[in-house]
């Protein structure tokens, strides 16, 4: 289930055929989802509510081909590895992976291993992968380190260019968004043909935001569906017994968490333009009620596949000396800015709509955003679903 399945249309732009990041030609997404156990938290045993999501920029037979990329930090309480090389070189040279906070290292190492394993025999290959995280420790045994290298490899093998599964899946399995169940969401936009007809897609791992701040296409849905009505996993309205048994040493306030945003386009952009596009993801988050608070990390990466760049060679000392690139003009970049803002907002809403209620460690429950109440709130504010 997605926002448009409920008749809720975000913004003015036109989505791609899948309304997903995989509308960008050649791009693939894969997930590995880990759900095991119930009841009291036992570190190392569970309950487990986590996973890995990968975004692969190129086709399977050309996945080593780099793409121009740029990045942006709205709030830095989080991690997205490899960004120093992205800033320095303007290139993304690996797939992007997203997981939980304490599994970044193992997933990063597994991505390095995947690069080495596919390299030409006898070559010396180095890799600085981009791996992002958000904290799923409210529902998941995050200190049990349940994500393994094999889970990253499985996500890479499962990566496809078709519809993207959303909600409680992959890296988003145990995530919470605006005090509802959150997770993975995606959306896309196709800009006008007169501006090139380029496609831009967004994928989010949404684990951020307070309930009262949530807005859907400008409607204050979070105020309309309060925690006295649908309980918050951070305590308000939860079962007191479950909360008294919860081993939460952090005492995290409602809204603690982060969001990772991946933006992709088939427009021919240069690295500085990718950085400018990445910045606009923050406006999409704000439109949905995110604020980039102290306990939240909002980290964004944007890449562009519109130029074909030289693939690494066996003899890395003899790369092509010159290669030609194309670049869009300012009229096109403005359209891509708008597409980024709308697609980011809709991807967050899609994550909320797709996610199902989940009970995790110590019986704490993150409830889904109730579809009937969402539709009623939209109608009450003159935005009746179509």
Image (cartoon, rainbow, N blue to C red):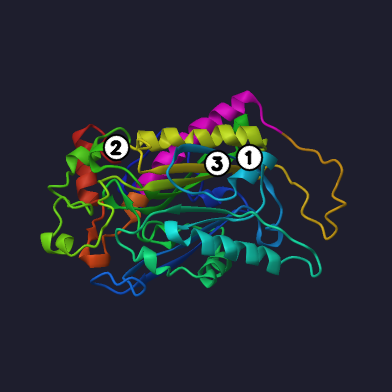
Q: Report the front residue among 10 and 334.
A: 334
Q: CA distance from mark 3 to mark 2?
A: 23 Å
**Crowd tier of the residue under label 3, counting other residues whose Cα lies within 10 Å: few below 14, some 14–19, many 20 or above:** many
Q: Quadrant of residue 172?
A: bottom left
Queried whether the magenta region covers residue 100, the answer comes back as: no
Image quarter where the C terminus lies is: top left
Q: Where residue 334 sits in the image (x, y, percent)?
A: 55, 27
> Residue tagged by mark 3?
200
User: Given the current orientation, which residue lies at the most extreme top position?
Assistant: 331
Secondary-structure class at tag 2: loop
State whether residue 192 appears in this view. no
Mark 3 / mark 2, whichever is N-terminal: 3
Mark nearest the camera among 3 and 2 is 2
The secondary structure that dominates the magenta segment is helix
Secondary-structure class at tag 3: strand
Q: Which mark is residue 380?
A: none
> Residue tagged by mark 2?
215
What's the magenta region? 327-350
């Amino acid at each position: 289930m997605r926002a448009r399945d409920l008749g809720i249309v975000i913004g003015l732009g036109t989505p791609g055929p899948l309304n997903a990041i995989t509308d960008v030609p050649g791009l693939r997404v894969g997930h590995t989802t880990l759900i095991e156990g119930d009841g009291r938290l036992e570190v190392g045993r569970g309950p487990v509510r986590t996973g890995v999501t990968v975004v692969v920029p190129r086709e399977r037979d050309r996945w080593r081909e780099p793409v121009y990329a740029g990045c942006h930090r709205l709030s830095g309480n989080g991690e997205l590895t490899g960004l120093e090389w992205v800033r320095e070189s303007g290139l993304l040279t690996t797939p992007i992976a997203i997981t939980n906070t304490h599994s970044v290292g193992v997933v990063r190492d597994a991505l390095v291993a995947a690069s080495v394993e596919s390299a030409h025999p006898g070559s010396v290959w180095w890799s600085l992968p981009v791996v992002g995280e958000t904290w799923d420790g409210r529902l998941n045994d995050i200190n049990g380190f349940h994500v393994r290298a094999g889970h990253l490899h499985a996500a890479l093998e499962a990566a496809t260019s078709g519809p993207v599964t959303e909600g409680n899946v992959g890296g988003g399995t145990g995530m919470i968004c605006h005090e509802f169940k959150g997770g993975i969401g995606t959306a896309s936009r196709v800009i006008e043909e007169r501006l090139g007809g380029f496609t831009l897609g967004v994928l989010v791992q949404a684990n951020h935001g307070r309930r009262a701040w949530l807005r859907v296409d400008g409607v204050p849905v979070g105020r309309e569906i309060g925690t006295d009505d649908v309980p918050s996993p951070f305590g308000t309205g939860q079962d007191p017994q479950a909360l008294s048994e919860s081993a939460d040493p952090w005492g995290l306030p409602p809204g603690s968490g982060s969001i990772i945003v991946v933006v992709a386009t088939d427009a021919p952009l240069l690295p500085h333009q990718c950085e400018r596009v990445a910045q606009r993801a923050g406006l999409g988050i704000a439109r949905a009620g995110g604020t980039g608070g102290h306990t939240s990390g909002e980290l964004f990466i944007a890449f562009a596949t519109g130029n074909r760049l030289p693939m690494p060679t066996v003899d890395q000392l003899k790369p092509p000396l010159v290669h030609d690139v194309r670049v869009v003009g300012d009229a096109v970049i403005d359209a891509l800015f708008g597409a980024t803002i709308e697609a980011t907002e809709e991807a967050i809403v899609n994550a909320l709509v797709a996610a199902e209620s989940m009970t995790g460690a110590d019986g704490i429950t993150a409830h889904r955003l109730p579809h009937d109440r969402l539709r009623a709130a939209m109608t009450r504010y003159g935005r009746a679903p179509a």
